[in-house]
Amino acid sequence: MADTTSLYKRKVYFLAQTFFIKDNQAELLLCAHKYDFDIQFFDQMAEFVRTAVQADPEDLYVVDLDVLYNMQLDDNRTMFLGDLLRRLPQQHHYVYLQTEKQSGRFLLQKMLVDNNCLAYAEKPIANDVLVDKLFNLFAQRKRDETSVVLYLGDQVRFDTALLATQQVNLIHHPDVQTLHLVVKQMQPDVVVIEDSHYLRTEVIARVLKKNIEVDPSLEIVLLQTRPDTALARKATDSGFDQILSLTDSDVLTHQLLNRISKIRTDKNLISKDRATGLLNKIGFKKRAQDVIRRASRDKVALALAVIDIDKFKTINDTWGHYFGDIVIKRLSLVVGAHMQENDLLSRFGGEEFVMLLWDCTVQTARERVDKMRLAFGDIAFEVSHIETRHFSFSGGLAAYPALKTENELFLYADEQLYEAKQSGRNRICG
């Protein structure tokens, strides 16, 4: 099969006892590969530490605490938790697996949390559940998108510099009468409204949420500058999602960042394809609408491409669905390597991918997608120990502003994809 070293974009380094690795390795790898990450197993502390020192901090590091009962130090002493923690590279964060007895000891949990513990889990834990939780941790730590906070108030109470370091853009808008228009235009993740402005227009939360063009996941937060239980209850009843009390700017900012982290995780789980990490159909449609609005404002050309692996059913029927998943993942990496900063790439389902190319004419798009087609065709997939095969894809193109909406663009590009399939496959039409 394809080389997993370059196939999977993320990696988990797993330190565990030998028997655990032998009993679980195959199934854990199978589950992890479906989520587009790989696992490297270790049963020796020294090798684990050496590898971790050189590895990417964005990877995950999992430690089964049962290793403490199976390892000895250089002077033949049994390894204790303090010895383990001192040896682990401090630039990483760790996920710990514990027994029920271990997880019941609060001081143990405190020691772990004080020493770069990202999360801990109690054993026994099913392999697919563990992999799903690790995937969620990858999603939580992913920071490739900017979040927007719209602030309605007389004075900004948050640390905007700290927010910026976490890719959060805070926009101060002091006029309640035009807030709904700005929300429609900016599509923020969170709207924070000070209590004084809410008191002037108590219907504001309902006005924002009733707009069909506003993201239904929008969160509206009331910032109370002074305690008022009756006001908080009234705001909650009128549609506010959260109440924050005015406190130190640093504390308030971290409260907002915690909320945004949860919003990002939820959006990733809803809008991302788990097998490839790309946008799914829901995520693409939402982001594409935003890009088209920007293109209209900035007078920029767009090209939408739909591509589809040729004879994919034959691939699945001949070599199995797991191998088919490998081909899909490899295509996602090939195409992803050709994406530019403002482009969108999604897996719509099965073997079909859709991309929206920023500041790109149809002619330029045809050249770019054709380079992707050739690069994918050059990959040799091992279908057996003695045989390799090459695969191809076909594609269709559509142009904005000749076509105005995401749906019009997709339907036309899909027609062109059908034309490419009918005229011999392994080509780009449009």
Image: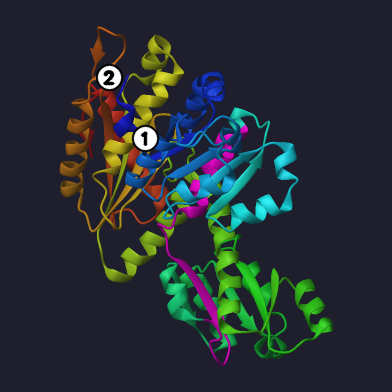
Q: Nearer the viewer, residue 84 or 40?
A: 84
| Residue range corresponding to the magenta coloring | 129-158
- Residue drawn where x is 60% and y is 60% of the image: 217
Residue lying farthest to the top in this orientation: 386
Q: Are marks 2 and 1 in contact (CB under 8 Å)?
A: no
- Mark 2 neighbour class, 10 Å CA radius: few under 14, some 14 to 19, many 20 or more: some
**Is 353 inside the magenta-drawn segment?**
no
- Residue drawn where x is 43% and y is 58% of the image: 143
- Residue drawn where x is 31% and y is 12% of the image: 383
Q: Is residue 280 visible?
A: no
Residue lying farthest to the right in this orientation: 230
- Amino acid carrying label 2: it is Phe
Q: Which mark is residue 381?
A: 2
Badge 1 is on which residue? 8
Give the quarter of the figure containing the C terminus: top left
Q: Can you say whether 186 is above or below 417 in the image?
A: below
Residue lying farthest to the front in this orientation: 75
x then y, percent, for residue 63: 53, 39
Q: Is residue 415 left or right of residue 290?
A: left
